[in-house]
């Protein structure tokens, strides 16, 4: 017999019971039959209670596992977020340093180019001055040589010995 059937029978037992004189809400029932029904409930109840308790236990276990999993997921997400923020900070700092290094390198390269250009211009100017002086010296020597040759030609034509001069 199921618990519902036993409870239904208890209900019928109360409905069929006679009322007590002067008190309409109290009834006289067969105590022996009521005790049997209560015992039947006790015998049949534990299985259903065990199922209910098992379901309640499973629900509680599932909720606890879900809570632990959620906490783990949140903890991992927070750690991941911290790593990402840390990496972003490192990347941002690295980018700043790279930009700074690039600017310094560009400035140094510009200075080096300017210094090299100034040095080359000075060397070219010095070289030009050197060759100008040498060219002047060459012109002087050439002029002297030309005059010596002209004098020598005159002397030869006049019959003089060029060594007598």
Image: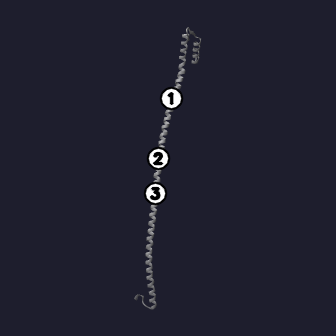
Q: CA distance from mark 3 to mark 2?
A: 24 Å
Q: Quadrant of the C terminus?
A: bottom left
Q: What is the residue that sits farthest to the bottom in this orientation?
A: 159
- Residue 132: which quarter of the image? bottom left
In the drawing, what numbered circle is on residue 61? 1
Which residue is the site of mark 3?
105
Residue lying at 48% horizontally and 44% vertically, measured from the top left: 85
In the drawing, what numbered circle is on residue 156? none
Which residue is the site of mark 2?
89
Residue lying at 54% horizontally and 19% vertically, measured from the top left: 45
**Compared to 124, does 8 lie above or below?**
above
SS category of the residue bearing label 1: helix
Residue lying at 45% horizontally and 58% vertically, measured from the top left: 107
Dot placed on the residue nearer the N-terminal end, 3 or 1: 1
Q: CA distance from mark 3 to mark 1?
A: 64 Å
Q: Is residue 4 left or right of residue 110?
A: right
């Amino acid at each position: 017999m199921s618990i519902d059937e036993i409870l239904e029978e208890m209900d019928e037992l109360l409905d069929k019971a006679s009322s007590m004189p002067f008190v309409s809400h109290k009834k006289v029932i067969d105590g022996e039959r009521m005790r049997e029904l209560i015992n039947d409930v006790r015998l049949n109840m534990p299985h259903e209670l065990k199922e209910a308790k098992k379901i309640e236990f499973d629900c509680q276990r599932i909720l606890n596992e879900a809570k632990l999993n959620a906490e783990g997921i949140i903890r991992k997400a927070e750690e991941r977020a911290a790593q990402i923020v840390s990496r972003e900070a490192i990347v941002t700092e690295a980018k700043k340093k790279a930009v700074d290094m690039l600017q310094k390198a560009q400035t140094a390269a510009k200075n080096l180019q300017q210094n090299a250009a100034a040095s080359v211009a000075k060397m070219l100017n010095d070289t030009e001055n050197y060759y100008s002086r040498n060219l002047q010296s060459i012109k002087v020597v050439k002029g002297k040589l030309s005059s010596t040759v002209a004098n020598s030609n005159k002397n030869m034509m006049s019959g003089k010995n060029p060594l007598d001069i």
